[in-house]
Amino acid sequence: MQLHLVIQPKGGAGKSFTALHLIQYLAQNTAVKAFDLDSANNTLSQFKALQAVPVDIRMDDNPRKVDTRKFDTLLENIIEAKTSHVVVDIGASIIDPFLNHCHEINFFSMSDELGIEQVVIHCPISGGQGFVDNLGGLKMVYDFIGASAKYIIWENPFFGDLSHNGVPLEKTKIFTAIQQDILGVVKIPVWDSETKKDDVKRMVTSKLTYEEVANSDAFKVFNKARLKSIKADFFARLDAINFTSDK
């Protein structure tokens, strides 16, 4: 089993958008089990076709607090999943207690014993004003997990360039420090037309997958053609990293 954790401690980087595309990409070749560990939004589980299981780790008698005992149940469900890939979308507000819990039980260091062949951290990083904070989020995650996992960085240019003081992402201290553990970088496309942007926005806000759009009467022929092209481009970028053994 390959365990994929979509993590970015800072909000607004495109975490659920990353998970949405990752699951659809993996599902081309094998069954995927997904968990939505973002009780504040549960965005991923709203895409019914993905069948992502919502996980609420808040205390039953105090929703403002995290019941860390529920992390054990989640991790046990991951271990028991009979599938090649498991994807977990982890809410920004939950990442700190989740990583602390995994560290406490040595989850990442014993992943081989648990039947997990590889842990892959998918960390979206947005440009613009949030760039430095997102880099800090990546460093925090690596400080917890280190080389016990491999990393895929998802560059999100929606809010601006991914650079600070003229230094691009690939030249930043954190990127160069962990480069040996980075499998690759997915550059989320900057769509060159308003029609493409509108089609993607409509698909996402409608909580539909690319396959559902292709079979939907609500999307017309040119909408479908543009989204088919966008999907092919996106998946080609993931193909280039070659991080699975399913093909």
Image (cartoon, rainbow, N blue to C red):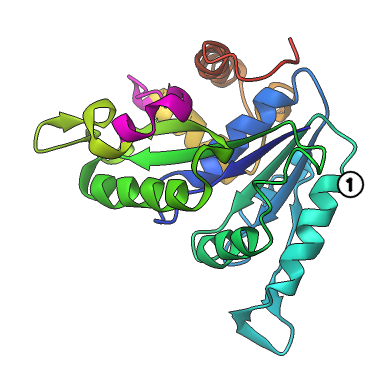
Find residue 176 and report its image quarter.
top left
Magenta-colored span = 175-194
Q: Residue 100: horizontal and vertical position, in percent? A: 56, 64
- Residue type at numbered disc 1: Glu
Q: Residue 56: horizontal and vertical position, in percent? A: 71, 68
Instruction: Work out whether residue 217 or residue 176 is closer to the camera in this orientation and state it.
Output: 176
Instruction: Work out whether residue 44 or residue 164 is closer to the camera in this orientation and state it.
Output: 164
Please give the name of the residue rendered at 70% of the width and 25% of the height, measured from the top-left corner.
26
Instruction: Work out whether residue 55 or residue 201 is closer to the camera in this orientation and state it.
Output: 55
Quadrant containing the C terminus is: top right
Find residue 205 and report its image quarter.
top right
Please give the name of the residue rendered at 81% of the width and 29% of the height, measured from the top-left corner.
84
Relative horizontal placement of residue 14, taking residue 172 as reference (left or right): right
Q: Is residue 154 above or below residue 90?
A: above
Element on which disc 1 rests: helix
- Report the number of discs: 1
Please give the name of the residue rendered at 68% of the width and 28% of the height, measured from the top-left corner.
24
Q: Where is mark 1, residue-wise?
A: 80
**In the rendered structure, does residue 64 fall within the stretch colored magenta?**
no
Q: Can residue 94 be seen in this snapshot?
A: yes
Relative horizontal placement of residue 145, taking residue 59 as reference (left or right): left
Quadrant containing the N terminus is: top right
Q: Is residue 213 above or below residue 140?
A: above
Q: Residue 13: horizontal and vertical position, in percent? A: 40, 46
* Crowd around label 1: few <14 · some 14–19 · many ≥20 (10 Å): few
Q: Can residue 213 be seen in this snapshot?
A: no
Please give the name of the residue rendered at 71% of the width and 27% of the height, measured from the top-left corner.
217
